[in-house]
Image: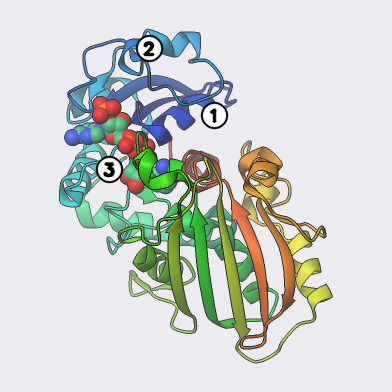
């Protein structure tokens, strides 16, 4: 099979580096184009990340000598890429939105990690196991903008990946959930590189991540929502209350979750069975990055733990443990997801695999 030619925008950052690592031997995608800020542009990738390569594997040989381009130089990408992964960070979100739209306008599909387009009316916020039908909006998106080949698909914030699939699995099994209280313990890699100053992080927990609680509470409502009259309608049946904290862990966002069911309350055994047996479109389609088991329940009392469980099923699975009764809601549990893999680059790659398999990326 001829591989797709892929570009990475924000290739020098934490998420960009993970894209490079995860795509090294990808069966469908070949990285041919790298872009970052004007500070990195014009020099070989190996040079541009000298002293700040964060992966434990070396930079792939064929990537080292690629000259980094400026993200805003879209015509260069147009000549080389079938689609791009967007993982660049600019504080002005309107500018990120504008740049991603320019790529789509130039006929380059954008598979994004950035938050800028998550609430754009005709942009799907995709988790392939949950809402692949939301891709139906892409025809409307292309029509709205008069885009021919290009489009934008985003993935949600990394903080919700650990609990949204387990919630969806229960909803889908006929046990809809009404209320969720969640407290996240988020890894430092979630803040990019160099991220949070070490003196704030060592021997400490930071009880606020700016903007994160709103994302954790609101984004699931779009993901679990529906499309009506060519627009997304938020799920109104669920209310979420979140507290998001930063903890001195390198990778892996842990969360404690309390849930209240809308009507029927399943037994613990039923819940664990639903989670362990959950499979969806990526598994049916055998997508290369799909976890075999999207949700893994650990019986051990002291699991999940970031160090021991974040890499489960290629870092793409959600690992849950400690399901028990809650004296205020129905149940509580602890859940974990790898933030820079499933919550960032791996999630983006799975989105692109679905888009390729379904013929959206040509
Ligand atoms: P990061 O480590 O700070 O990397 C930022 C990247 O953006 C670098 O490649 C940087 O290039 C580039 N950049 C900075 N200023 C730019 C500009 N003016 N124009 C073009 N490119 C610019 O951040 P990150 O953690 O990789 O996050 C990247 C994106 O993914 C963000 O939108 C973030 O919210 C999202 N995300 C991150 C995670 C995570 O776990 N880290 C999870 C989900 C989503 P230079 O090296 O040249 O400065």
- Whether residue 210 is situated above or below residue 60 in the rendered picture: below
Instruction: Count residues near mark 1 (Cα–Cα under 10 Å), then give few for <14, some for 14-19, many for 20+.
Output: some
Ligand 1 - quadrant of the structure image: top left
Image quarter of residue 104: top left
Q: Secondary structure at mark 1?
A: helix
Mark 2 — residue?
46
- Residue 134 visible within the image: yes
Q: Mark 2 vs mark 3: which is more N-terminal? A: 2
Q: Residues within 10 Å of mark 2 (few under 14, many from 20)?
A: some
Q: Quadrant location of the C terminus? A: top left
Measured in 3D between alpha carbons, the distance from the residue under mark 2 to the one under mark 3, in whole angstroms, is 35 Å
Q: Is mark 1 within 8 Å of ligand 1?
A: no
Q: Residue furthest bottom?
A: 263
Q: Which residue is mark 1?
A: 22
Q: Where residue 264 appears, x then y in whole percent?
A: 70, 89
- Tell me residue 331's x, y (percent): 68, 79
Tag of residue 148: 3
Task: Tell me the colour scheme of the image.
Answer: rainbow
Hey, which quadrant is residue 194 in on the image?
top left
In the image, what residue occupies the spot 21% across and 28% down? 37
Judged left or right of residue 108, residue 64 is: right
Disc 2 Cβ-to-ligand 1 distance below 8 Å? no
Q: Are marks 1 and 2 in contact (CB under 8 Å)?
A: no
């Amino acid at each position: 099979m001829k591989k797709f030619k892929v570009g990475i925008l924000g290739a020098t950052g934490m998420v960009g580096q993970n894209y490079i690592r995860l795509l090294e031997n990808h069966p469908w995608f070949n990285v041919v184009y790298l872009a970052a800020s004007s500070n990195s542009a014009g020099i070989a990738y190996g040079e541009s990340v000298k002293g700040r390569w964060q992966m434990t594997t070396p930079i792939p040989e064929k990537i080292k000598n690629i000259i980094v381009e400026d993200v805003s130089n879209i015509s260069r990408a147009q000549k080389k890429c079938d689609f791009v992964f967007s993982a660049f960070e600019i504080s002005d979100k309107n500018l990120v939105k504008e740049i991603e739209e320019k790529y789509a306008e130039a006929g380059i599909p954008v598979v994004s990690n950035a938050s800028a387009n998550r609430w754009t009316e005709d942009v799907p916020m995709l988790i392939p196991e949950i809402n692949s039908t939301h891709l139906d909006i892409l025809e409307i998106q292309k029509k709205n903008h008069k885009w021919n080949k290009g489009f934008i698909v985003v993935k949600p914030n990394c903080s919700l990946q650990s609990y949204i699939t387990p919630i969806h699995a229960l909803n889908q099994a006929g046990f809809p959930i009404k209320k969720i209280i969640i407290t996240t313990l988020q890894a430092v890699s979630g803040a990019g590189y160099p991220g949070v100053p070490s003196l704030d992080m060592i021997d400490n927990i930071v009880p606020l991540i700016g903007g994160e609680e709103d994302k954790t509470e609101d984004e699931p409502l779009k993901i679990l929502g529906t499309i009506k009259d060519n627009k997304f309608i938020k799920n109104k049946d669920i209310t979420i209350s979140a507290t998001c904290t930063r903890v001195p862990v390198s990778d892996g966002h842990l969360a404690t979750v309390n849930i209240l069911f809308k009507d029927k309350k399943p037994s613990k055994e039923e819940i664990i069975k639903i989670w362990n047996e959950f499979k969806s479109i990526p598994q049916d389609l055998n997508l290369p990055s799909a976890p075999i088991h999207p949700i893994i329940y650990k019986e051990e009392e002291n699991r999940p733990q970031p160090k021991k469980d974040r890499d489960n099923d290629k870092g793409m699975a959600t690992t849950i443990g400690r399901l028990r009764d809650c004296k205020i809601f129905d149940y509580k549990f602890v859940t974990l997801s790898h933030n820079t893999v499933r919550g960032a680059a791996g999630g983006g790659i799975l989105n692109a695999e679905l888009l390729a398999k379904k013929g959206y990326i040509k």
